[in-house]
Image (cartoon, rainbow, N blue to C red):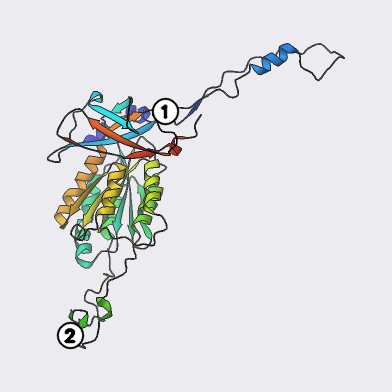
Amino acid sequence: MIRSMIGLATVLWFCIPASAQIQPHPTLNPPPAAPTTTAPDKPSTQQQKSTDNDTRNYIKVHTEVVVVPVTVKDRDGRLVGDLQREDFRVFQDGLEQEILKFSADPFPLSSVVLIDNDLNQKQAEQVQKSLVAISSGFGPADETAVVTFQEYPNIVANLSFNNDQVQDQLKRLELSKHFPGGFGGPLDAGPVINGRSQQTGVPNVGATPQTVNKCLDDAIYFAGELLKARGRDRRKIIFLISDGNNSRYNKHKFDETLQLLLNADISVYSISVGHALFQHETGRLEKYAGGTGGDAFFAGKANELERLYSRVTEQARTQYILAFSPLETNRVSDYHPIEVRVRRSGLDILAREGYYTSTLGPKR
């Protein structure tokens, strides 16, 4: 397994501080001057000049470092793992940047498996059958949490390196027991045509469009909060399984949530389930994935889900890592777009679309 290749050198290489302060060692104080009775409070010309030249309290050097995980695939969707530093080009605000650090080493994962718990009955059953397979993609160096969400997120398993514990929680998890939308309960009024019950002839209340109560943006924000304190020596991902539906009443909006993810170097890997693709509900999932350098997938059946789980973890673990110190480009805007290119033709690139300057520390 490639996870055994994870080395301490990679950990040390990318733990780059956002800023550094240079302060020379203080010099020894001169001996006290002889007592004098003239102008005791006024420093001598030599003392004043020495004070003016003393810069040891305010010499500072600020270094900004932007880390960009990159996935490269060929046109058949296979990962490309033989590229070198010179194969990559990075642009910020349209200006090419110098790549200071490069790594193709695999990274351990810190992940939140975020599961939609407001699916219809068929979707919930498909996801339920596949859940145990999620844990097979994680190893002893990875830490994983499991969170479900409807209107509010709920922690099923806290971040843990104990993969057996995560697997046990996934086995016991029961999704969508309420089965929204009326799927065969005692209060159902029988078959309905054009909104009218064929038993009573009166309009059926359940035939009206159901209000979406689940808050997708809030759930992703919550998962980001769980991961943001993890360091740059780990790949931080949100492993999202959802039909893509989202309430209008999220506390955290899309832009705010995306900023949190970019600030914390978190990527979203989304798997759309059920009829999300045909109902055009995958847009938000794809925007989170594309904006953070993750990826978006679709699965219609349980066996497809199981295959995708291992694919997601492999892809997240084996990204290239590029780091650059941005040149003085557009200092007016807090957000800076990024573009990554490769010199080899016929390849598809997945990378974060930008970053926020405010996350790199105050300017000097």
Question: Is residue 215 among what the camera can see?
Answer: yes
- How many C-alpha atoms fall within 10 Å of the one at disc 1: few (<14), some, or many (≥20)? few
Query: Of residues 185 and 359, which is closer to you in this image?
Result: 359
Q: Which amino acid type is marked by label 1?
A: Glu
Question: Is residue 305 among what the camera can see?
Answer: no
- Whether 262 is drawn above or below 240: the answer is above
- Whether 21 is drawn above or below 231: the answer is above
The image shows residue 274 at horizontal and vertical percentages of 19, 60
Q: Which amino acid type is marked by label 2?
A: Gln
The image shows residue 133 at horizontal and vertical percentages of 21, 51
Which residue is depicted at the point 72% across and 11% down?
46
In this view, the mark in front (2 or 1)? 1
- Whether 272 is drawn above or below 122: the answer is above
- Of callouts 2 and 1, the N-terminal one: 2
- Determine which quarter of the picture holds residue 78: top left
The image shows residue 300 at horizontal and vertical percentages of 16, 57
Judged from the image, the secondary structure of the residue bearing numbered disc 2 is: loop
Contact, CB < 8 Å: mark 2 with mark 1? no
- In the orientation shown, which residue stands out farthest toward the right? 37
The N terminus - image quarter: top left
Question: Horizontally, is 63 left or right of 108 in the view?
Answer: right
Question: Horizontally, is 262 left or right of 70 in the view?
Answer: right
Judged from the image, the secondary structure of the residue bearing numbered disc 1 is: loop
- Determine which quarter of the picture holds residue 9: top left
- In the orientation shown, which residue stands out farthest toward the left? 76
Q: Which mark is residue 31?
A: none
The residue tagged 2 is: 198
Q: Which mark is residue 328?
A: 1
- Determine which quarter of the picture holds residue 65: top left
- How many C-alpha atoms fall within 10 Å of the one at disc 2: few (<14), some, or many (≥20)? some
